[in-house]
Image (cartoon, grey):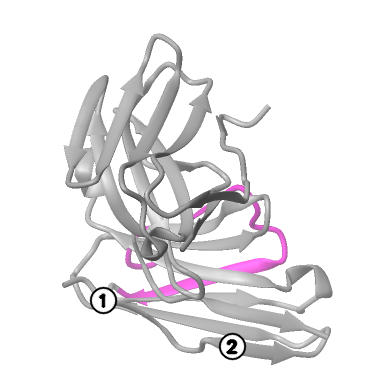
Amino acid sequence: DVKVTQSSRYLVKRTGEKVFLECVQDMDHENMFWYRQDPGLGLRLIYFSYDVKMKEKGDIPEGYSVSREKKERFSLILESASTNQTSMYLCASSLGFSGLDTEAFFGQGTRLTVV
Amino acid sequence: QKEVEQDPGPLSVPEGAIVSLNCTYSNSAFQYFMWYRQYSRKGPELLMYTYSSGNKEDGRFTAQVDKSSKYISLFIRDSQPSDSATYLCAMITDSNYQLIWGAGTKLIIKP
């Protein structure tokens, strides 16, 4: 079974802090994604990566950056946390870009609260 | 207008009822259609997957795609309290690389 593991289930951070969210997958997937999920808005893509050291902006990249130094690990960085970044953050991975290879395997999510 | 529209609910039905969950979309190039189920405090998991038009059945679940109407449905027969979850539709074209997601419908099955 594919396993995607996020480093924290719950985080509380202060406004202005630099926040790191870590994600590791164990199935040698090429693609990794960071989403945030908010009630009524569904999943919104922040960034994705299709290879080591490669990254692409998603729909809402402002205020975020990412790092992928190894294939299995994809980190999301909040440069200066703000209260409007309070959300559920979901990491996902997928095998490829075609057909069922696009199936996304998700971690359990990190609920981040910025106070 | 969003590319994929999905009523967020909540949808509350009694146990044993037939449930119909729906998404509409605007991009006629979508070819792959997925339904994910997300339990509370968990990540989404793939439930059903269909390619192009038609029906697909898996146990109590049926996924239906009507490309002429740009409309997809997920039917749940004999619904159980354990089916209570948020159901998200997702779709992708042949040439794109990004799944496009609906907002998710929260389903509550009352015992």
Q: Chain of mark 2?
A: A
The residue at the point 62 percent across, 46 percent down is B8
Q: Are marks 1 and 2 on the same chain?
A: yes
Q: Tell which of B96 and A56 is nearer to you.
A: B96
Up-down: is A48 above or below A101? below
Q: Confirm whether the magenta stretch covers residue A53.
A: yes
Residue labelled with disc 2 = A10
Q: Position of residue A73 (x, y in %)?
A: 35, 78
**Which residue matches tag 1?**
A3
Q: Residues within 10 Å of mark 2 (few under 14, many from 20)?
A: few
Magenta span: A50-70
Q: Position of residue A1 (x, y in %)?
A: 16, 72
Lower position in the chain sequence, tag 1 or tag 2: 1
| Quadrant of residue A77 within the rendered picture | bottom right
Q: Quadrant of the N terminus of chain B?
A: top right
Q: Chain of mark 1?
A: A
Q: CA distance from mark 1 to mark 2?
A: 19 Å
Q: Residue at x 54, y 81 (%)?
A: A21
- Secondary structure beneath label 2: strand
Q: Amino acid at mark 1?
A: Lys
Q: How many marks?
A: 2
Residue A38 in the image: x percent, y percent? 66, 60
Pointer 1 local density, CA inside 10 Å: few below 14, some 14–19, many at least 20: some
Q: Is residue B66 left or right of residue A15?
A: left
Query: Three-letter amino acid code at disc 2?
Result: Tyr
Q: Locate residue A39, reporting x and y percent.
A: 67, 58
> Which of the 4 image quadrants contains residue B89?
top left
- Report the side of B71 relative to A88 (left or right): left
Residue A83 is covered by the magenta coloring: no
- Determine whether A53 is above or below A112 in the image: above
The relative height of residue A31 versus residue B16 in the rendered view (above or below) is: below
Q: Quadrant of residue A71?
A: bottom left
